[in-house]
Image (cartoon, grey):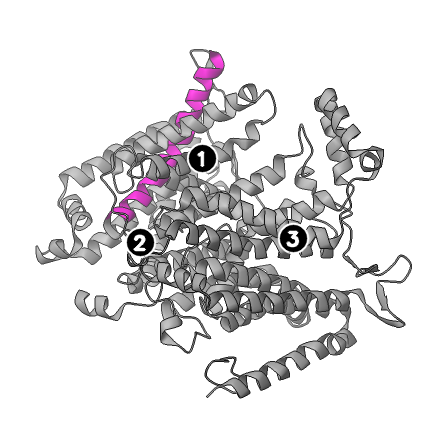
Amino acid sequence: MALLTFDVHHNKRQAYVSMGLLLALLLAFPFAASQFGNSWVRIIDIALLYIMLALGLNIVVGFAGLLDLGYIAFFAVGAYLTGLFSSPQFAALLESVVNYHPAIGESLISVFGPDIQQNGIHLSVWAIVPLAGLVAALFGALLGAPTLKLRGDYLAIVTLGFGEIIRIFMNNLNDPINFTNGPQGINMIDPIRIFGVSLAGEAGSQSTVYIGGYGMPSVNAYYFLFLLLCIATIFVTSRLQHSRLGRAWVAIREDEIAAKAMGINTRNVKLLAFSMGASFGGVAGAMFAAFQGFVSPESFSLTESIAVLAMVVLGGIGHIPGVVLGGVLLAALPEVLRHVVEPAQMAMFGRVIIEAEVLRQLLYGLALVGIMLVRPAGVWPSPNREERPNAALARDDEEEAAAV
Amino acid sequence: METFVQQILNGLVLGSMYALVALGYTMVYGVLNLINFAHGDVLMIGAMVGLSILQLLENHFPGLPGFVQLAIAILGAIPVAMLVNVLIERIAYRRLRNAPRLAPLITAIGVSILLQTFVMAMPWWGRSPLPFPQLLSSDPIMLGGAMISQTQVLLLVLAALAMVGLVLLVERTKMGRAMRAVAENPRVAGLMGVDSNSVIVATFAIGAALAAVAGVMWGANYASITFTMGVLPGLKAFCAAVLGGIGNIYGAMIGGLLLGIIEALGAGYIGDLTGGFLGSHYQDIFAFVVLILVLTLRPSGIMGERVADRA
């Protein structure tokens, strides 16, 4: 019996106790970590965003069994949407329209008014988050629609191509109409402001956020926001997993033809998997943009898609606690290594022999290859055998017996 | 008109490289029903090894003529790429041969990342773009108003030779017959006395050799290589293989050339077609659009047989 269990159905009391313990630890964490410097909390902030991404991808890959290699595109959609609608970028967009086609530009300006022409649009977080989720969901459906009939491996390549296409557009949609500001990316994105409190801290406060009379570093404030979002994501995805829709996803994952024969509308259910998974990616992207204050196409490369996939695969495809563990391991570990390994090498050999970036990629690659070869259900697979992906990943014992 | 001829020539050059890589995808797919995702990175390894050989030649035997150097580089890169691809098969795919198809695909992605990381970590390669020496004379050859460089002519000749050689190998030799038999039905081929493992190893080796040729020539043509250079050509070559009908070697050749021409023409004319709204930097999009169109309209491709749609 594991020390911590999150299996509410079989062991209710122990599950609630371990959840409570974990929550207390998580709430105390930033105060302990910030003693060693804010950069450690920052690492965890980013890790929390990756966990959100991994949970979203888990809906597509884990529940529905559709291998999506372009998932970071939805993250990018959310981030760029935030960049466009809560920074001065919209002013630059209007200006480029005026230069390209004065008549359309002037009429747009008369619609939006002189203030937006000067300063761009600055939507509040309450509008940005649902908008990012919705638009990303739309893109998810857009990707899903032409790929519905494709077999698993073709689907993987098409989604990968989709990710690349989005990246190409991000890089080039600055001319003649400046949507994305091209390779330079969008700057000066507004920090998140909740009930009038800016999570980046007010000007002159040295990134300290004051709530009432109490102040804490900006990274801690973001930590609590991201933690809340992560918990919400875990809650929603675990409820989804055991819903009618979740069962339909699993049915499709295990045998699409059989699922269809049982009366599941496979087209709609697959589209829902794509768009629901994508919407989590979009929200995470919006948070990322506001947190960094800056987005550029570099943050959304193929490597990032593969990194998120590696988190899902390492932890345990389809098992939410496993995916969270995978996210923690693969998002935080490389950053910790960056802080530990390079200085250690400097101290020992006087120069950096293995760069942290190399180690990071090495971890992703090894996670993907090693897990598939040794333990295809992941390091923390679901305790219930029927919840593990069989048709998609684990070796089919009967088939193997027949093949020998 | 001149632009048109020029773009067709560019397309043929690009397409012959895609075709060489697409052959590797399609042959492996033919025998194993597996997308060897790391194939693009085998091309990259070929280019890197070729570059290192050229540097060694430069240091130890200066003054060799350019095409001799290039020939040595290609001949040296081929066995290394073969070894790498055979090792990939042995380590990452063989144990998963009877596993459901997503499992080897995921290991393939992992292998691709590992190969890139390996090259990135090597002090003599590293992560920044490496200049590839100009070996053949840079004087272009004029052809009906269009220009083609000598490197590109050599590339076309090499690609044609490699493809003829491959066709002879597959159609005329015992190994080729064994390959076709395994592609048709591995179990029955095994019963007929074909050692399917050695056939599979041979398939990976041949695919890698073609990719190595493409890799070195890619470097010679574009004069710069990096550890991520294999990703995009690999993806596009896969699109080419699907366009031609995956599993069919003639399809891969036609698909590769066709995709090259589509890309070149698309890049050349997209600006005029969209009134300057989209420019030639959208070149990379065409391959994926073609892929999605082919998969929706005619999943079996130009030459392929019907593909069963069982997941």
Q: Are marks 2 and 3 on the same chain?
A: no
Where are the magenta residues, as a range? B1-30
Residue B131 image point, x, y percent: 55, 39
Residue B140 image point, x, y percent: 48, 19
* Residue A132, numbered circle: none
The residue closer to the viewer here, B81 or B264, is: B264
3 vs 1, front mark = 3
Label 2 packing within 10 angstroms: few (<14), some (14-19), many (20+): some
Q: How many labels does the image show?
A: 3
State the residue position of label 2. Answer: B311
Furthest residue toward left: B192
Tell me the chief SS of the magenta region.
helix
Secondary structure state at the residue bearing disc 2 = loop
* Residue B289, numbered circle: 1
Note whether residue B229 is visible. no
Label 1 packing within 10 angstroms: few (<14), some (14-19), many (20+): some
The residue closer to the viewer here, A291 or B109, is: A291
Q: Which chain carries label 2?
A: B
Label 2 with label 3: CB-CB less than 8 Å: no
Instruction: Examine the rendered structure and indicate whether residue B87 appears above or below residue A162.
Output: below
The disc labelled 1 sits on which kind of residue?
Answer: Val
State the residue position of label 3. Answer: A130
Label 3 packing within 10 angstroms: few (<14), some (14-19), many (20+): some
Q: Are marks 3 and 1 on the same chain?
A: no
1 vs 2, front mark = 2
Could you give the CA–CA distance between mark 2 and mark 3, rounded to whole angstroms?
A: 34 Å
Instruction: Examine the rendered structure and indicate whether residue A120 appears above or below residue A16.
Output: above
Name the side, left or right, on which A358 lies relative to A178: left
